[in-house]
């Protein structure tokens, strides 16, 4: 495809992924306003939980169906589902409707994330793919940081409905571009899709989330509803385990849990997701209800947490790639996150926002040191055949942890709020005409009450939100304990190529083991190609004295007949005059010849021999990078397939 067409497609894919990633965090600062409009404070957590559950559980289906039936029209279907869900969310007239439509939106969002990344591999050459993978990782980072801020801006300057309506014009642009420009993928991979595993695991998870949401608040723990949900969850998990043993392509193979590294990392990831989304959901409520800040400013006050997560995710990846050591990062990270949660558990209505910002920075730093590293730990611990499902499993547990965290902490918040409100209402003389239910249905009402009355209710809300962190802190300490059981192993080369998007994104990946290795290899190759690759390759291939630019020319002429010199200059993004000295050097060495009119170049017989040496030397280099996965015909074919492309046929990048 022409570069302009590829650029348009990439922008559309990034736009689709941005929308799905934003909708994990953008609603956090809008939730207090949504509750004040629709009521249902006790159901607040489900606005976040429904989206996380739907996107996480649907991801394996989107990935496998895309492989089997082609990704273009499935991506179109994901956009349509997401946009329909977004429109209905904006039109919601009750919390029940909003939660249902958020679930629909989440189903589409899961498809947007997993298919957008897969389509990149269909339209972009191997040589360019590493750079685009970095861009997609940046989309997750941007969404994590600006999501709460954008949610606040829409609420302040438009209405909470625009948190969802904004998806419509942007998604429509992505839809039109994909339909008009993206070619239909002709390749197909046959799968035996584990529908039973997906449905049973999703059902068991939903039952458990309902237990944690309703238990002790809507229903007593001994109520038949709670007991029935618990029994249903247990039964579904048993059936799921039986289904996974028989499935040809299980969504989560049970033998992975025999690996200590996978089990510990998954449990820690669950807690990390628990803490991250719990904090993101309830801190805006504290800021808006207790301190009376605007939705936009509540997003600004969350920036220290998001900045700490982003910065430490990047730094952690650099540390791992340079040292090969990773075990100390989750140990330190969970300790810092636990400290941050403990500090946040002391919040009162009199707490300084500056102090809270420091506490959020500590929490974000700890989460950033942990999130991305857990995926690397899992990838490094499993065999090649399990690499794909293990990676998706690790991110699955973090996503489910987020859903459980929001639901469980929501239950804690509601229970403490009801208890404190009952005590205040029993001991406080209320003015005539005042309806206590207003305070629970609309937290922003507190700011409009007389000061002496408002003080009591401010304390109630501050105490309820601080209780959320008092519960979350010891859970994070459990994760800190678990990190000590993660073994340190020699780090595989392709595993060092950390993926920032997978570290920050909440939706699980869904790629084959071969695609995971190729993803890491391509990212390593992207770095290699920017750091003197042609100089080293020329030296290894016996082309001493040939400039790197000359090695680049030999690689481009390999397998070609006469090639216009102007075309070579265009590919290198240089003028023909600046490239001529390197061509002249090759002609003097007898490796290249020039046509009679002086406008075209081609390899001589000796040049073709040199080109073969370049290919062989490059191939050996890529083989060494994947050798620590053991011998596999698939990996051998991977190296043979990508070597010519990485050497640069028809690629517009200078050496």
Image (tube, helix red, strand yellow):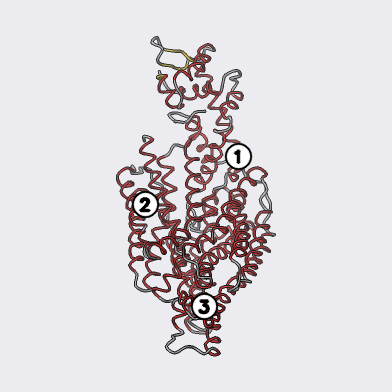
Q: Earlier in the sequence, mark 2 or mark 1?
A: 2
- The answer to whether residue 550 is above or below residue 107 is above
Seen from the viewer's position, the closer of residues 407 and 621 is: 407
Question: Pointer 1: residues within 10 angstroms few (<14), some, or many (20+)?
Answer: some
Q: Residue at x 60, y 73 (%)?
A: 348
Q: Which mark is residue 414?
A: 3
Which residue bears the numbered disc 2? 75
Quarter occupied by the N terminus: top left
Nearer to us of marks 2 and 3 is 3
Image coordinates for residue 265, horizontal then vertical, percent: 61, 58
Q: Residue at x 53, y 27 (%)?
A: 615
Q: Quadrant of residue 539?
A: top right
Q: Which mark is residue 627?
A: 1
Q: On the rendered structure, is 378 left or right of 148?
A: right
Image coordinates for residue 272, horizontal then vertical, percent: 58, 62
Q: Which mark is residue 449?
A: none
């Amino acid at each position: 495809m022409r570069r302009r067409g590829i650029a348009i497609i990439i922008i559309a894919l990034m736009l689709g992924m941005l929308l799905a990633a934003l909708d994990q965090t953008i609603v956090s600062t809008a939730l207090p306003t949504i509750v004040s409009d629709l009521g249902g404070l006790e159901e607040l957590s489900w606005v976040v939980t429904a989206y996380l559950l739907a996107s996480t559980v649907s991801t394996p289906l989107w990935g496998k169906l895309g492989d089997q039936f082609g990704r273009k029209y499935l991506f179109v279907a994901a956009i349509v589902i997401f946009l329909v869900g977004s429109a209905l969310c904006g039109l919601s007239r009750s919390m029940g409707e909003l939660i249902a439509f958020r679930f629909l939106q989440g189903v589409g969002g899961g498809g947007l994330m997993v298919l957008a990344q897969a389509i990149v591999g269909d339209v972009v050459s191997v040589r360019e793919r590493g750079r685009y993978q970095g861009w997609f990782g940046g989309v997750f980072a941007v969404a994590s940081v600006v999501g709460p801020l954008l949610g606040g801006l829409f609420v302040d300057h438009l209405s909470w409905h625009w948190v969802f309506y904004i998806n419509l014009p942007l998604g429509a642009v992505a839809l039109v571009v994909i339909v008009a420009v993206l070619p239909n993928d002709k390749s197909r991979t046959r799968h035996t899709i584990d529908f039973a595993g997906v449905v049973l695991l999703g059902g068991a998870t939903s039952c458990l989330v309902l237990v944690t949401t309703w238990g002790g608040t809507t229903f007593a723990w001994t109520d038949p509803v709670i007991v029935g949900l618990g029994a249903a969850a247990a039964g579904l998990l048993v059936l799921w385990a039986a289904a996974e043993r028989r499935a040809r392509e299980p969504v989560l193979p049970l033998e992975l849990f025999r690996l200590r590294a996978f089990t510990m990392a998954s449990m820690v990831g669950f807690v990390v997701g628990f803490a991250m989304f719990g904090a993101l959901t309830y801190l805006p409520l504290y800021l808006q209800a207790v301190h009376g800040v605007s939705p936009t400013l509540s997003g600004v006050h969350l920036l220290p947490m998001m900045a700490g997560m982003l910065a430490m995710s990047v730094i952690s990846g650099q540390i791992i790639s340079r040292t090969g050591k990773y075990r100390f990062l989750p140990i330190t990270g969970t300790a810092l996150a636990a400290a941050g949660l403990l500090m946040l558990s002391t919040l009162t209505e009199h707490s300084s926002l500056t102090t809270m910002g420091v506490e959020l920075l500590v929490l974000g730093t700890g989460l950033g040191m942990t999130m991305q590293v857990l995926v690397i730990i899992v990838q490094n611990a499993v065999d090649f055949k399990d690499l794909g499902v293990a990676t998706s499993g690790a991110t699955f547990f973090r996503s489910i942890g987020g859903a459980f965290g929001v639901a469980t902490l929501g239950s804690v918040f509601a229970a403490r709020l009801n208890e404190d409100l009952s005590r205040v209402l029993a001991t406080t003389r209320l003015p005539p005409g005042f309806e206590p239910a207003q305070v629970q249905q609309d937290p922003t009402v507190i700011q409009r009450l007389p000061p002496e009355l408002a003080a009591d209710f401010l304390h109630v809300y501050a105490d309820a939100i601080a209780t959320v962190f008092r519960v979350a802190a010891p859970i994070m300490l459990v994760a800190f304990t678990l990190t000590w059981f993660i073994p340190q192993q020699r780090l595989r080369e392709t595993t060092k190529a950390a993926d920032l998007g997978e570290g920050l994104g909440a939706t699980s990946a869904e790629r084959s083991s071969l695609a995971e290795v190729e993803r890491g290899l391509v990212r390593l190759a992207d770095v290699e190609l920017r750091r003197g690759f042609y100089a080293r390759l020329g030296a290894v291939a016996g082309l001493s004295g040939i400039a790197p630019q000359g090695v680049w020319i030999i690689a481009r002429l390999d397998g070609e007949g006469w090639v216009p010199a102007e075309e070579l200059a265009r590919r290198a993004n240089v003028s023909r005059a600046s490239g001529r000295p390197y061509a002249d050097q090759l002609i003097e060495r007898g490796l290249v010849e020039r046509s009679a009119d002086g406008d075209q170049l081609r390899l001589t017989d000796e040049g073709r021999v040199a080109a073969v040496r370049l290919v062989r030397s490059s191939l050996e280099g890529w083989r060494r990078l994947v050798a620590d996965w053991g011998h596999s015909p698939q990996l051998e074919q991977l190296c043979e397939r990508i070597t010519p492309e990485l050497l640069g046929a028809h690629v517009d990048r200078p050496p």
